[in-house]
Image: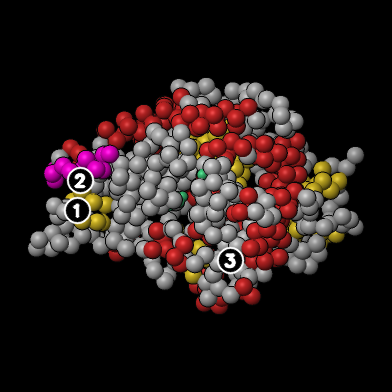
Amino acid sequence: MTSSLSPVTETVTLVPDANWWRQATFYQIYPRSFADANGDGIGDLRGIITRVPYLRQLGVDAVWLSPFYPSALADGGYDVDDYRDVDPRIGTLAEFDEMVTALHEAGIRIMVDIVPNHSSDRHVWFQEALAAPAGSPARERYIFRDGAGADGELPPTDWQSIFGGPAWTRVPDGQWYLHLFAKEQPDFNWDNDEVRADFRTTLRFWSDRGVDGFRVDAAHGLVKDLTEPLPSAAQMSATNVPGRNRLFDRDEVHDIYADWRRVFDQYTPPRIAVAEAWTDTAERRARYASPEGLGQAFNFDLLQAGFDAVQFRRIITENLALAAASGSSTTWVLSNHDVVRHPTRYGLIAGSAPGEAAEAAEAVDTAIMQVGGREWLLAGGPEDQLDRARGIRRARAATLLELALPGSAYLYQGEELGLHEVSEIPDDARQDPAFFRNKGVEVGRDGCRVPLPWTRGGSSFGFGDAGAHLPQPAWFADVSVEAEEADPDSTLSLYRAALRLRRELESEESLEWIETGRDDVLHFRRPNGWESITNFGTAPAPLPAGRVVLASAPGVRDLRGELPGETTVWLTPEG
Ligand code: GLC
Ligand code: CA
């Protein structure tokens, strides 16, 4: 972690610490929805530059920047036209350099998203592949196959794309190409040496520009076994063996990351990486976090759990053990650009855990969406099925618990404001391919990607001078940065206080559980004496001895020895 927060104007010199990431707080910026400096309705790099003081005051150690590359936005930028440039609607390479300098001078590191499983269909290589004949070297960089049926008129297999619909699309000469996501996202062929070499060039390109690390999109994809005969989807799932699945999490994928590690280690400090890897088991996920590979992997277990002490304890214990075994530090995530924001998940009356999804969806008329094969509840049902205040209360408690854990925490823009999912987006304003490819089934991920509210009023709540590219609801006024900065009990004030204390209280990467005698109360102590206690239930619990340094519940001034329901408190030793 960086040294403690200095005045917002003073330039910080980052020390080249190879372990800076281990317990860092990362803040995910979804650039098109963060801040729009030129008033065209789309967030941009200049917008980020102007908000560096905000990030510094928030107290984050690093920014993770979601894709900012040229893109037709078939999948919010995860369809990349050119891996070594900036989308002209977002900025220029010169502005990128300026942003890196501004962040570094504020003591904030930067990690960029890299999307190696697929490019966009506008990538120069895919355009070349389309123009070239079947069997040509240009087609070899992607996955082209002849179709089934008498005239090849059927897709080679019945595989479904993760966003719904077939995973194969036919090109004019009759061949089909594979896309595990949208049809605008053709999968690369990672057996091709040119593909491998090009990604090494891309990693160097950004590393040379001062980028500190990479978030690796769909890291469990890339290597596929497409030996004939290709199995059907049903055969694939019936014969699934971790490590030998035809499409995901194959053992050979780690050769690629070992190769990347050699690139990362040529820099001082070494560039870091975190894998987005959806695997069958937590143990398989830990392989991506090996120091010989990417070094860290997202742990989405808390994000998939309900607000439940038993689940939280099991997940924390298991992941700390896995991190220790892999040599990495663990990661914690409650929200990101792919899921329903955690205050909304926790506020759905019918429940929020995946197991409860079907039942809850029926009860509240929400939709369920699938991302990476997981189910998520999407708010969209009647407002009376969402207890907003309770959702925020629980979210604040969960966040404070998260920020007291060993390891790194990945925050998603807007969660520091306690934003709820935006459910009131009309169909004709939606952008997510998961919505279009699953008409009537999924509402998609736009509800967590609505441009941030910076001010109470004004055009687009201070996001920019014109509108916002996704409609913002009226309730954004009260959860704007301006409104929350003025309120010591706001979620923003809580995050600022928590992140400041988290730096001050940094401890070794372990914890000790303290038994509370209650299944719904979790209490742990870090090696330096810092304690966190969370009451997941509604009945008050006794508050242990110690000095209360922070409480998640708004308006709590005097706890009088009592820990209220759905609240987390941080304690330090008395005296
Ligand atoms: C990852 C991203 C998601 C994207 C998908 C395809 O899951 O987080 O937003 O749609 O990969 O690139
Ligand atoms: Ca703009």
- Residue appearing at x 62%, y 60% in the figure: 420
- Residue appearing at x 55%, y 73% in the figure: 381
The circle on residue 352 is 3
Going from the N terminus, do you reach mark 1 or mark 2 first? 2
| Mark 3, secondary structure of its residue | loop
| Mark 1, secondary structure of its residue | loop
Going from the N terminus, do you reach mark 1 or mark 3 first? 1
Q: Can you identify the residue that label 1 sits on?
A: 171
Q: Which marked residue is nearer to the observer: mark 2 or mark 3?
A: 2
Q: Is residue 574 left or right of residue 232?
A: right
Frontmost residue, 252 versus 89: 89
Find out whether residue 133 is within the magenta segment. yes
Find out whether residue 17 is within the magenta segment. no
**Residue 273 in view, yes or no:** no
Frontmost residue, 245 versus 214: 214
Callout 1: CB less than 8 Å from ligand 1: no
Residue 222 in picture, x, y percent from top left? 34, 44
Q: Quadrant of the N terminus?
A: top right
Q: Is residue 478 left or right of residue 301?
A: right
- Residue appearing at x 56%, y 42% in the figure: 37
What amino acid is found at the position of numbered circle 1 in the picture? Val
Q: Can you identify the residue that label 2 sits on?
A: 130
Frontmost residue, 293 versus 138: 138
Q: Name the quadrant containing residue 16.
A: top right
Asked if labels 2 and 1 touch by Cβ distance under 8 angstroms, the answer is yes
- Residue appearing at x 32%, y 32% in the figure: 198
Residue 495 in picture, x, y percent from top left? 71, 47
What is the number of callouts on the image?
3
Residue 108 in picture, x, y percent from top left? 62, 33
Q: Is residue 209 above or below residue 300?
A: above
Mark 2 and mark 3: span between their CA atoms? 44 Å
Q: Which residues are magenta?
A: 124-135
